[in-house]
Amino acid sequence: MTFKKIFQKTYRESRGANPLTFVFCLLAQVYMQSLKTHSKAFLILKNLQFFKQRIAEFYFAEIFYFYGDFTRSLKHLDCFLKSNPNHADAIYLQAMLLACLGCKQEAFLSLEHLLQKSKRLKTWIILAKIIQDSKDLEAAKQILSNNLYRLERFKPHQWEILKHLANAAARIGEYKEAKRLFKESLFLQGNSKNLITKEVMDLKSAKEALEDLRNLLEANEIQMFLVSGTFLGCVREHNFISYDKDIDVGIYKQDLQKAREVLHKSKNFKLNTLFKNYQGGVQIRHLNNTYIDVFAHYEERGRIYHDGDYVRWWNTPFKLAPYEFLGKQYLAPKNYTLYLKENYGEWKTPKDSAQYETFLTTPNMEITNKQWFICSLYNLLFEVFSMRNESKILERLRELGEKDFVQEYLEFKQGVTTE
C-alpha cells in the first residue's frame, strides 16, 4: 500500500483524534504493512492504549482479524465501539468478523443500522461481500427494500449497489437473479460515464508480497512458480506489468491442502475465509494489501490445467527453470516462448490495457461454468474496457445464447442516446 493510501486510510479512521494521536496511528499503520515491523506497531498501539486512546483498540482488532484470531479481534472492536458506536470502518470490520464466526443475522443488522447514519457506498459493498447463500441474498434484498426511502442519498450510486448484489448472486449460483439485477443496474446506469476502473497494485508492495510468499512456501517444501501475467511481466518487462491488479503464481495440486494450512497459520497472509469451496487454488491478501492468486496445477488428458471460478486454462506440460526477477530467483515454465504463446498469442508486443481482457482474448481458456461466465460478461459492460469493446462483449453474449438480452440492451442504449 502506498504511503498516500495509508495516510488517507488513517485520516479517515482516526478522524476526531488529536494531531499527536493521528501521527502515532499513521506510524503504526506504516509498521503494520510488514510482519518484520509488527513489534513496533504493537508498541505504539500499547502506548496509545495506556493513554486511553480508544483508536488503538480498532487497530488491534484489524491486526487480529488479519491473523485469523476473530474472537480476540471482536473483543478489541467491542471495546472501541462502546465509545464510537457509529464508526463506519469499525462496523464494516465487525460485520466481516460476525460473518466469519457464523453470526450472519447480527452482521446484517449492524450494516442496516449503519445505513441510517452513513452515506458511504462501502456499506452496501460489505453487505454484498458477506452473502454466502440464497438465504443471505434474500436478507440483503430485504434490507434494500426496507431502506428504499433512504436511497435518495445513494441515488447516483443505485446502479452500483445493484451491481454488487448481482455479483454476489452469481457467486452463490443464483444466476437468474444475478442477470435480473445486472440488467436493472445497467439500465439505471444508462450512458453514465461512471465506468469502473480496476485498481492496479503498488509494484513495490507486490515485490515484497511475492518474496514473502516464496520464502514461506519454500520453508514448507511447497514448490511455487510464476504463471500467467506475472510470468509475462518477468520475461517481457523484467518487472510486474504496470496495469496488473494482482500476482499470479502456481503450485501443484497435490500441495494445495498443505499450502492452505501453511497460509492459514501465516501472519503475513490472509485467506479468503468466507468462501472455502474454491478448489482452483488459494486467494490471499498480503499485509501490505497486495492480492495474490495461487493456482493449483494438475494434469488431464496430456495437458496441464489451472482453474478460475468459471473458466480454466490449459498449457502443454512444462518443466520448471529458474529466472531472475526483481533481484531474486523464481521458478517458472522453462519453455517460456511456448507457454506465453499458448496464453497470449502474440505476447512480445505489449497490449493496450484498455483493449485487453483475459476472459475475451485468452486463446487457451475453456469455460467450466457457462452461466457464471455469462454473468461475468454482464459485469464487464460496467467497466472502462467496454467503452471501446462493447461490441466484442455483446457478440460473445450472443454466441452464448443471450440474444434477447443483447437486443434489449441495444434498444435501451439507442433510446438513451436519442433522448
Image: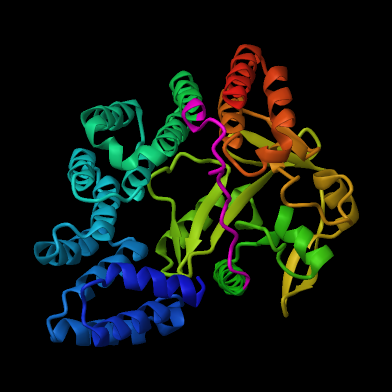
* Magenta residues, dominant SS class: loop
Q: Position of residue 255 (x, y in %)?
A: 58, 53
Task: Identify the residue at horizontal 66%, vertical 58% (top origin).
Answer: 244
Residue drawn at (19%, 63%) of the image: 77
| Quadrant (top left/top right/bottom left/bottom right) for the C terminus | top right
- Was residue 337 drawn as part of the magenta stretch in this picture? no
Residue 66 x, y percent position in the rendering: 36, 64
Expressed as whole percent of the image width and height from the top left, the position of residue 249 reads: 65, 57
Q: What are the residue bounds of the magenta stretch? A: 186-203
Q: Work out which residue is located at the far front of the displayed protein and give it.
A: 419
Along the viewing direction, whichever of 3 and 388 lies nearer the viewer: 388
Q: How is the image coloured?
A: rainbow
Q: Quadrant of residue 335?
A: bottom right
Which residue ends up furthest to the left in the rendered image?
Answer: 82
In this rendering, the answer to whether 220 lies above or below 129 is below
Q: In the shown orientation, is residue 72 left or right of residue 316? A: left
- The residue that appears at 64% across and 14% down in the rendered structure is 407
Identified at 36% across, 47% down, the residue is 121
Q: Is residue 396 left or right of residue 81?
A: right
- In this picture, residue 265 sits left or right of residue 361: left
Is residue 408 positioned above or below 19 on the image?
Answer: above
